[in-house]
Amino acid sequence: MREAFATKLLAFAVALLFLVAFTNPAIAKGSLLSLKGVVVSVDNTAKTLTVKEKKGEATIVADQATKVTIGKEKKSFEDLKAGEHVTVRYQKKEGKLLANTIAAAPSRAGKMEKAPGMAPKKGPEKHG
């Protein structure tokens, strides 16, 4: 009798787990879409980002829950700039593309000095 009860309880728990996992959008991340492109413009007041991708341009809306990173650093929406390469994970909500995450590639400025095969910068040579 105890085994039958334990089996039913386990089956109920598994069913409940599946129900919660597939009805909660925060857990069911399969509903997120993704796009990659270059930032065309940023509107900090409206919290929108226009990204040019292969299919054209898309306007993404950010909110207080949107996570922004540049490289490996956590940043704010206001740190994003035109010309940056981004990957945006978003969901369609109320006719808008609402960003869950915006990941920008780190700036390439300054990396030319560290390119392979290039000699490091030296200070002025001393003669004498």
Image: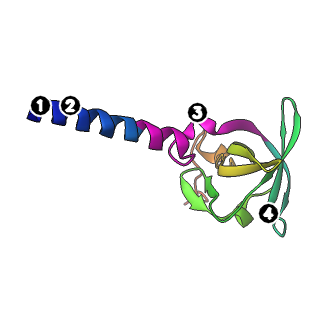
Give above or below for 44 relative to 84.
Answer: below
The alpha-carbon separation of the residues under discs 1 and 2 comes to: 6 Å
Instruction: Determine which quarter of the picture holds residue 35.
Output: top right
**Quarter holding the N terminus?**
top left
Q: Picture coordinates of residue 79 (x, y %)?
A: 71, 63
Q: Mark 1 touching mark 2, by CB under 8 A?
A: yes
Disc 1 or disc 4, which is closer to the eye?
A: 1
Does 125 sit left or right of 2 as displayed?
A: right
For mark 4, give the secondary structure: loop
Instruction: Determine which quarter of the picture holds residue 112.
Output: top right
- State the residue lying farthest toward the bottom: 45
The residue pinned by badge 1 equals 3
Mark seen at residue 7:
2
Does 2 sit left or right of 9 as displayed?
A: left
**Quarter holding the C terminus?**
bottom right
Dot 4 crowding, Cα within 10 Å, few <14, some 14–19, many 20+: some
The residue pinned by badge 3 equals 117
Disc 1 or disc 3, which is closer to the eye?
A: 1
